[in-house]
């Protein structure tokens, strides 16, 4: 099914009332959480994407570690003790950076692949459609070549920045850090542009940079606001758990609270990462088309995107 197909319609997302818009950053972030959560409630399968991403990345990491141990190290746990004396440091550095590149490529590709599925489903929902988990995977498969190419570029940039940081003094490390932050900001909308905008890898970078300039960084601030919201919520829950533990003062209760907190943190990571993707796509759609996605307060989205579209 085409990710933009809206022939399979479902209940439209509720349209927020048109009220005067005046609120602080945290209140706006809270509203964004609420409205993006309404999207998640309509498409509950979205929550499975970060779960599957984590599982596949863990499997990939185990495979990568196994290949490194059995093929490169020859299953010898003392491999590096002998290599340190037999090979120059430059050769060891090259090996380390090669492994790092493969690791970056694997993690970026897996994350971007499943994010593409999320964007396809959310885009359909914004336009009145209703796609399944399988439809999201199909959309990712249709873009798999571009996703791999973008992941390859991201991995290359990541390794280059790591080399600069490792080989530099303090100033070099600062420059590498600043360049890394700039790269992350300029490519903020690159994946939605690839998958939803159907741009090439080169054009997706250009569009992302142009949209970031248009938003004057507000999109990044909104994204930070979402993180702040969940940080505050987590702090409140943690304080509550600690308070209960101090009052009760039983080892069994502390163990139970620790287990519950771990479960809570897993749920927060899954939900927050999904909502972050929904909000990013909502901002991308408005910034690129001028159309406010269904279910979002127009003033809220418009306020996050500066300039005319």
Image (cartoon, grey):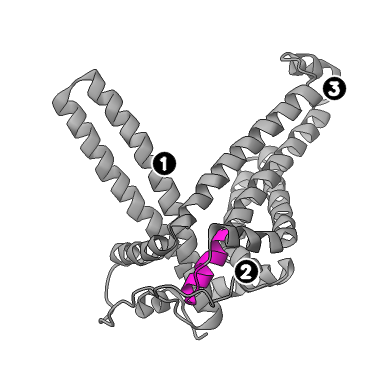
Q: CA distance from mark 1 to mark 3?
A: 43 Å
- In x, y percent, where is residue 81? 75, 14
Please say if the residues under marks 3 and 2 sit with CB atoms less than 8 Å apart. Answer: no
Q: Earlier in the sequence, mark 1 or mark 3?
A: 3
Circle 1: is it few (<14), some (14-19), or many (20+) Cα within 10 Å? Answer: few
- In x, y percent, where is residue 105? 70, 46
Please say if the residues under marks 1 and 2 sit with CB atoms less than 8 Å apart. Answer: no
- Whether 66 is among the magenta residues is no
Can you say which quadrant of the picture contains the N terminus? bottom right
Label 3 residue SS:
loop
Of tags 1 and 3, which is closer to the observer? 1
Q: Nearer the viewer, residue 81 or 114?
A: 114
Q: Nearer the viewer, residue 216 or 294?
A: 294
Label 1 residue SS:
helix
- Tell me if 147 is positioned left or right of 217 in this view: right
Q: Nearer the viewer, residue 43 or 244?
A: 43
Q: Identify the residue at horizontal 23%, vertical 38% (top origin).
A: 239
Q: Identify the residue at horizontal 35%, vertical 76% (top origin).
A: 297
Of tags 3 and 2, which is closer to the observer? 2
**According to the image, label 3 marks what residue?**
87
- Tell me if 110 is positioned left or right of 306 in this view: right
Circle 2: is it few (<14), some (14-19), or many (20+) Cα within 10 Å? Answer: few
**According to the image, label 2 marks what residue?**
1
**Vertical position of residue 299 compared to residue 260: above or below:** below
Q: Earlier in the sequence, mark 3 or mark 2?
A: 2
């Amino acid at each position: 099914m085409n990710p933009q197909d809206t022939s399979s319609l479902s209940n439209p997302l509720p349209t927020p009332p048109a009220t005067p818009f005046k609120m602080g950053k945290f209140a706006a972030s809270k509203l964004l959480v609420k409205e993006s959560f309404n999207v998640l409630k309509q498409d509950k399968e979205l929550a499975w994407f970060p779960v599957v991403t984590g599982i596949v990345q863990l499997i990939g990491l185990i495979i990568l570690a196994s290949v490194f141990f059995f093929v490169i190290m020859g299953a010898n746990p003392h491999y590096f003790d002998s290599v340190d004396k037999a090979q120059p440091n430059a050769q060891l550095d090259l090996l380390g950076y090669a492994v790092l590149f493969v690791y970056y490529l694997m993690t970026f590709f897996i994350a971007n692949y499943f994010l593409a599925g999320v964007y396809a489903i959310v885009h359909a929902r914004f336009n009145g459609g209703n796609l399944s988990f399988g439809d999201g995977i199909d959309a990712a498969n249709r873009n798999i070549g571009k996703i791999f190419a973008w992941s390859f570029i991201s991995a290359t940039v990541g390794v280059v920045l790591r080399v600069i940081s490792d080989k530099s003094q303090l100033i070099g490390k600062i420059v590498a850090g600043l360049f890394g932050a700039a790269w992350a900001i300029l490519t903020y909308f690159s994946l939605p542009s690839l998958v939803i905008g159907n741009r090439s890898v080169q054009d997706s970078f250009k569009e992302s940079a142009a949209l970031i300039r248009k938003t004057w960084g507000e999109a990044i601030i909104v994204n930070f606001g979402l993180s702040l919201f969940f940080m505050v919520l987590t702090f409140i829950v943690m304080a509550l758990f600690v308070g209960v533990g101090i009052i009760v003062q039983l080892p069994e209760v502390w163990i139970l609270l620790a287990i519950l907190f771990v479960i809570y943190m897993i749920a927060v990571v899954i939900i927050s990462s999904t909502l972050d993707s929904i909000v990013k796509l909502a901002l991308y759609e408005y910034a690129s088309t001028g159309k406010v996605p269904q279910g979002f307060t127009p003033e809220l989205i418009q306020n996050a995107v500066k300039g005319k579209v």
